[in-house]
Structures are given as structure tokens and as C-alpha cells.
Image (cartoon, rainbow, N blue to C red):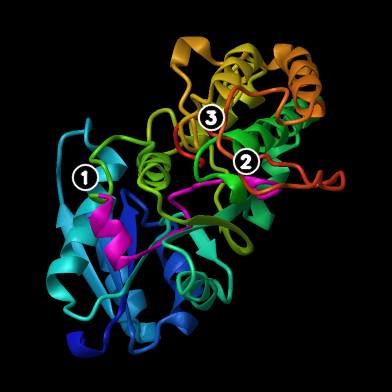
Amino acid sequence: MSFARCIDTAIIIPARDEAARIASCLAALAPQCTERVQVILVVNNTSDATAEIARAEAQRRHIDLCILEVSFPPELGVGEARRLGAQHALHSLPHLRHLLTTDADCCVALDWVACSLRHLQIVDAVCGRVEFLPNEVAWLAGLDRVLLDHETRYRKLVQRVFARHAPNCADLYDSHGQTPGASLGFTRDAYVAARGFDPIPCGEDREIIRRMRRMGMRARHASDLSVSASCRLTGRAEGGMSDTLRRRLAGQAYVADDCLPRAERLIQQARKGQLSPWPPKVAPGDCIPMHELPAHSAKMQDFLAKPAAASTAALPPQSAAQSPAPSGQQTIYAAPATDG
């Protein structure tokens, strides 16, 4: 039985046809679901036994689970599912203080809830990093590692420019920079002030963080907060990570993540003080072809090598950041409109 007076944390999980994975998702959460936590599963547009399996798993593992079974037009998508789950939590839990969200094909780390809440004592929003489930990584052996290295390098350079020149983004420097719906957390007040998730097919994760930063809220990309996600090739959101992986494994000509602007445009905006907060959103036709990334990286390196005062026009002072040591980590999770 759920006692709303005790619950101050809600975990929102959208799920569409996730009968094969929802039990594992809930099993990972179960040890962290104290009397303060309610899980809200938004089973949307589903034709399989997701709800029944989730209900049985929650009962077996003593999880306070609320299931919302809904159907809505495809143009709304996962953003609407997250929005509905959060709306239910806001209306039904009078002592709600924190909203967390993950995905039904993910397994959160053992300390995911506690780590999220610890960060939310200091910041308004916390973004975790996403890795792939260890038992599925072998599926990605065919990815072009050279192109992935180019994308990882360019992403780090773009983040350095944003950390130096974009408003309310100094914390982005040398962070993972992801804003994935698979691992997001908000204080209740921040979520309400930002007007919540947008009811869109995908990209609702990046949009809410972008809006929060624009409003002056504090967001943190926490390196100690992680989830493991499926790297399946048949996903639920059109244009999401599964579509990206499928194209890349097929060897098709493809483009970099849509949060990576072209170097010339980014440098021009930085010099004029016109950068909007991270993460940016590049129009589909303007994304960088992967084979062009080395040239863009060279331009960005040259720009960043110049003193900040010389490479920008009358920008307000920001926190100084030192160049990080080179990292051997590689970001594979690069999905247009969904990564964060």
C-alpha cells in the first residue's frame, strides 16, 4: 500500500511494448525503492503484456508501483509519456520533492536513486551518463571506431566552447555533457518552473535541460551517475538511438550528433556572444557528415588555443577553466535528438 504522505521521490518510466525488458528495469530499481519512492510506469500505445509483467514484478519485489495505461497519437511520443507520468506525480503526491526518470530498456546503477538525490541537494537538475548493457556490446563490433573517435573528440571541443562562452554553461567543461531521458533528475520546483517535458516524439530530454539553463537554473552532468541501456537496433522513438546505431552498423553515410554545430557557425556565435545554452540543436540538413569532423576539430582547436578575450567580442566574464588531461573514454551513445 502506498502512503502518499511518506513519498517525496517519483521515478517516471515510459514503456511501449517492453514486455521483454521491464522486469530487468524494475529489478535494478527494487533495492533502491524505499518507502519514500514511488515508481510511475507510463505504459503507452502498447499491445503486449508490459503492464501485467510490471505489476507482477513490482509485487514480488515490493515496489510501490503506479501504472498508467494510456494511448495517444504517435506525434506526441515519449515526451508525452514522461509528461503524463510527472503530471500524475505532481497531482497525487503532496510531499513530492524530486522527480527522476529513466527508460524501460535500462538498468540503473546500484546507487542511482541515492546519487541523484545527493546531487539534487545542490543543483536543480542532474543528468547521468548512459552506457550500453555489457551483454549487448558485442552487437556493436561493426561500428567504425575511427569515426567514433572523431565524433568523441569534436564533442569535447564543442563542450569546451560552450563552457567558455555560453551563458550558464561553465559547469559543462570536461563533463560527459549528456542529457539523456534514461537518467535525468529534477527538483520539483525546478521541473514546475520549467513547465515540464514537452509532448514530442523524442528530444524532450534535451529540450527541458536547454530551457532550464536558459532560465538560469543549475544543471549538472554527473560522472558518478549512470545507467546501462539496451543497444537494440529496433527502438521505440523514431530518430532515436536505435535508428542511429542501425544506420552506422549498415555502413551508410551518416552525420554527427545533432547537438554538434559546424565549427564556423559555432565560432561566429561565440565571438558575438550569441550562443544559447547547452545542448544546442542543429537542423537536420545542417548536421556534419562524419568524414568532415577532423577539419571541424582543427578549426575548433585553433579557436580554443586563442585567449578568451581575443576570441570573443565583449562577452561577460565566466569561470575560468583549465584544459583537461586527454581522456581515453569514448562516447558511443550519440543519438540525434535523444541523447542528451
Residue 21 position (above or below residue 238): below
Residue 32 position (above or below residue 288): below
Name the side, left or right, on which 282 lies relative to 311: left
The quadrant holding residue 305 is top right
Look at the image and tell me in which quarter the N terminus lies. Answer: bottom left
Q: What stretch is highlighted in magenta?
A: 172-194
Label 3: few (<14), some (14–19) or many (≥20) C-alpha neighbours in 10 Å: many
**Residue 181 shown in magenta:** yes
Residue at 50% over, 28% down: 275
Residue 147 position within the rendered picture, expressed as x and y whole percent measured from the top left: 75, 24
The quadrant holding residue 289 is top right
Residue at the front extreme of this rendering = 314
Residue at 28% over, 50% down: 194
User: Quick one: 143 or 164, which is closer to the camera?
Assistant: 164
What mark, if any, has residue 45 been given in the picture?
Answer: 1
Which residue has dot 3 on it? Answer: 259
